[in-house]
Image: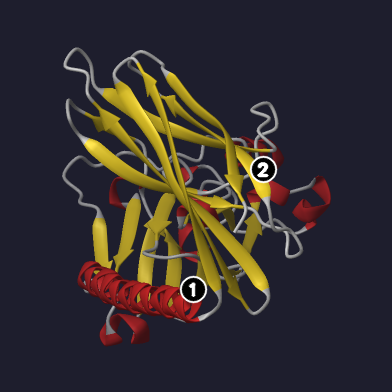
Amino acid sequence: MLLPLLIALATAAPTPPAQSASPDRQVRRIPIDETALTRVHEVLTHPSIPAVIEFPEGIVGQPSCGDCINLARATPQDMATPPLFGVQLFPAENYIVIKPTDVSAEEGGAIPSQAYLTSLNVRLTTGITLTMLIRYAPADRVDARVVFTLPNRSAESAYVRDAVAKAKATLEADFAKRVDSAVATTFMRALTEQHECAPLSAKKWHDQVLLEAREICRYTIDSHPMAFLVFSIENRSRAAPFHFGEVVLSSGGDADAPLDVESYPEPQELKFQQKMTGVVRVPVEPSARAATYSLTIRETGGKGRELSLPGLIYDP
């Protein structure tokens, strides 16, 4: 009789019961404070109504139970000495389920109800240890659900969130300031080092949009050359805006061999008579001097127009 009951307990759905046997009984909520930590909390349970014990945080290790068996691991050999209580652990959900493994002698079993008694110790992730005394009780007196709470946890969580947010904002502001300072220093240093700029003055009209390549400037910092091609786009079309999108730079005037480049600014819409200036970083070999490039601006959306300026010669 006992083994089939244990198997049924082990395979039962782990969902906590919605209510106790008696409709007027309340869910027991126990705030965890200094008094609660020094008390032994009595929990009443019955084979037909397990006690679901919930915790405000994770469970560390295996709970210590004086006369219990883990129902998820029960085997016939474990039943040589029948335990008094069966336990199911749900650490991911922060609760456990416990109940007697058989009915008492008063209800047709072999062991008197007063003999069903064991201790249960549970340690939580913050180091709190809770001690419970598990007793057999009639079905109408059980603690179907016992909930341990940390009364100040919500306030503590809000404080931690605010503190983390403030610290993060401070770090981000400090990082942004240091980045801006480093960029400004690098730029000013580049201006003091050897550099050359060559005007281009190449223009391309297409569907009332003007693309102009204005100049290429080359800077050298610690023997590392950097070059930038400055261009401008002006929309003179009343009919449609120009959706500035992708910048393509090719070497040797070959539009089919694009280089891996960075450009500024971000994609944007140019309305009638609006003009923008952009720049694209040109890869430069340390030993290279004269070079020829092809600049292409592709419209994203709108008419999908494409403007190209081939044969841009840089020869400082």
Which residue is labeled 2 in the image? 2
Front one among 115 and 203: 203
User: What's the residue at 27%, 85% (across, down)?
Assistant: 35
Q: Is residue 214 above or below residue 221?
A: above
User: What's the residue at 45%, 56% (across, down)?
Assistant: 95
Give the mark count.
2
Q: Amino acid at mark 1?
A: Thr
The residue at the far right in this view is 77
State left or right for residue 152 relative to residue 203.
Answer: left
Front one among 279 and 140: 279
| Residue 202 at x, y percent in the picture | 45, 36
- Count residues near mark 1 (Cα–Cα under 10 Å), then give few for <14, some for 14-19, many for 20+: few
Q: Is residue 191 above or below residue 274?
A: below
| Residue 296 at x, y percent in the picture | 51, 30
**Sequence-wise, which precedes: disc 2 or disc 1?**
2
Number of the label disc, if any, that sits on residue 125: 1
| Residue 265 at x, y percent in the picture | 37, 46
- Count residues near mark 2 (Cα–Cα under 10 Å), then give few for <14, some for 14-19, many for 20+: few
Can you say which quadrant of the picture contains the N terminus?
Answer: top right
Q: Is residue 213 above or below residue 122?
A: above
Front one among 21 and 92: 92
Residue 204 visible in the picture:
yes
| Residue 12 at x, y percent in the picture | 55, 35
Q: Amino acid at mark 2?
A: Leu
State left or right for residue 228 relative to residue 233.
Answer: right
Instruction: Give the secondary structure at mark 1.
Output: loop
